[in-house]
Amino acid sequence: MIRNIRLASGLALFAYVTTHLLNHTLGLVSLEAMERGRVWFLLIWRNPLGTLLLYGALTVHFALAVGAVYERRRLAMRLSEIIQLAFGISIPLLLASHAAGTRMAHEIAGTNDSYAYVLLAHWKFSPKYIAYQTAGLLAAWVHGCIGIHYWLRLKPWYAGVRQVLYAAALLTPVLALLGYAQAGRETLALSADPEWMRQASAAIRWPDRAAIGTIENIADTVWIAVFSGFALALIARHVRSVLEKRRGTITLTYHDGRAVTSRPGNSILDTSHHFQIPHASVCGGRGRCSTCRVRIIEGFGALPPPSTEEQHVLDRIGNPSNVRLACQTRPHQDVSLVLLLPPNASPRDARARDARHNGQEMEIAVLFSDLRSFTKFSEKKLPYDVVFVLNRYFAEMGEAIETSGGQLDKFIGDGVMALFGIDTDINEACRQALRAAQAMASNLERLNQTLSSELDEPLRLGIGIHAGHAIVGEMGYGRASHVTAIGDTVNTASRLESMNKELQSQLVVSADVGKYAGVNLSGFPSQDIDVRGRRDAVHIHVIADAKELPLGPA
């Protein structure tokens, strides 16, 4: 709830700043264009609903910022967080006089706070406010852009539009400040005409000394409120720290055996950072991304239950019940835990994932293939020729596998591993695997004909297929992670592939595959073999030419 309120109030303020800057860009056309644009700007923001939205969002956002400082267990922050917080604090300080001198002057003294009024005040009477205005607008824009970036970076589509948004983030303030400067110079030139100044002053209705004193008091009050709010947050943090010291400490034990002590109520993520334990946190500990998630090995039952927001994130990524977000979990007793993502986790790791990414047992078909005597071929050829032939081979095999419904798992040297059944049942998976083997044999024959002038002898292929239970999940490290499978079924399929050499065959397939696929393989030689690590023998069929598989139309 708090996160959504912060986001909503921030978006409202960012919309105000954006429309304000767009109005400034009209200064590149003329002062008159700025005044015309201001009519629409006021239509949006200077009405009861717009006023309530603007000042309500400002109050709520400031209160949540003060609360966030109090909630932090440690003030050490990343550079982007420091910049965002510093700019956030500076915005009301830099723009207090501007806000009081425009909207409050309008409300108190009936001043027409037009662009002519503001530009005369800045460029003719008090040039120091040019720097305040420029710094304040840039601070507001950068603060908002950082917040928008942290919000959108978790969206799958963000990478595709990031460059466009980045260009807009650069151009908008540049054009706005150029418009502000151009209009300022135009106003200075116009103010040299006494008649123009007389008419402008009559339209503006400048505030008198009493009103100016009130406006200055309002600006001073804003400064006092800002400093008081953050000072109270820091004092409250100190009081909380003193009280927590009296409760003793708890121990957090990490998967590598490292044990650290922390105060009850500190989040796991804060404790990791305090002891300089690398711990992923793409969103900076805001409970949005899930990259800080940990698996609780001991002490799970004693943890406070997850909040609604945390549970929503956990449900989104499909994690089991013993997984928690480190940034939201504040243990009060000893816990043992495992970090689930590497410290360099990316926004991709925060996106919703189906169960197979997290690991589950499935019935699948696994196919291994390998080129025969390719080492001898590579010794006689230039590296360029070897890479060329391999890439052509992989393209043909990959097409055969994917067209048949399989998923390419990996290329290992001149070998291929593919999975079938990730998105279908075991019966269809086995039919797909057999169709893939048949297509691979056909594609290899075509490739041999195409490369006949490059090859001393035709390329030969060995394929092994087995079906059964396997553990499927995303495995690896960093960018080298992908969905793969491990287990006895995988090992057996690899062993069947290696038997082609001694059996002088192109395909060795277990009888289970034929049974699941509903394909009669009794016309091919069969035998029982022992596979290392398996207690029972595997009944196999030996097929000299995979193109001869008795498969009907797909």
Image (cartoon, helix red, strand yellow):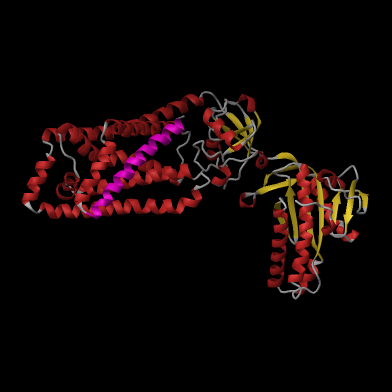
Kindly indicate the quadrant of the structure image that contains residue 201: top left
Kindly indicate the quadrant of the structure image that contains residue 533: top right
Q: Is residue 278 visible?
A: no
The one of 167 and 294 positioned closer to us in this rendering: 167
Q: Is 452 drawn above or below residue 431 in the view shown? A: below
The residue under the point 53% across, 38% down is 274
Q: Give the left or right position of residue 279, taking residue 51 as reference.
A: right
Q: Is residue 313 visible?
A: yes
Residue 420: percent from left, percent from top: 74, 48
The one of 467 and 251 positioned closer to us in this rendering: 467
**What secondary structure predominates along the stretch shown in magenta?**
helix
Residue 30: percent from left, percent from top: 21, 53
Residue 377: percent from left, percent from top: 78, 70
Q: Is 52 drawn above or below residue 37 in the view shown? A: above
Magenta stretch holds residue 21: yes
Kindly indicate the quadrant of the structure image that contains residue 203: top left
Q: Give the left or right position of residue 296, taking residue 66 as reference.
A: right
* Residue at the limit of the structure toward the bottom, as seen here: 453
* Residue at the limit of the structure toward the front, as seen here: 553
Magenta stretch holds residue 343: no
Count of picture labels: 0
Q: Which residues are magenta?
A: 2-29
Q: Give the left or right position of residue 313, taking residue 296 as reference.
A: left
The residue under the point 20% across, 38% down is 101
The residue under the point 85% across, 44% down is 515
Residue 60: percent from left, percent from top: 36, 31
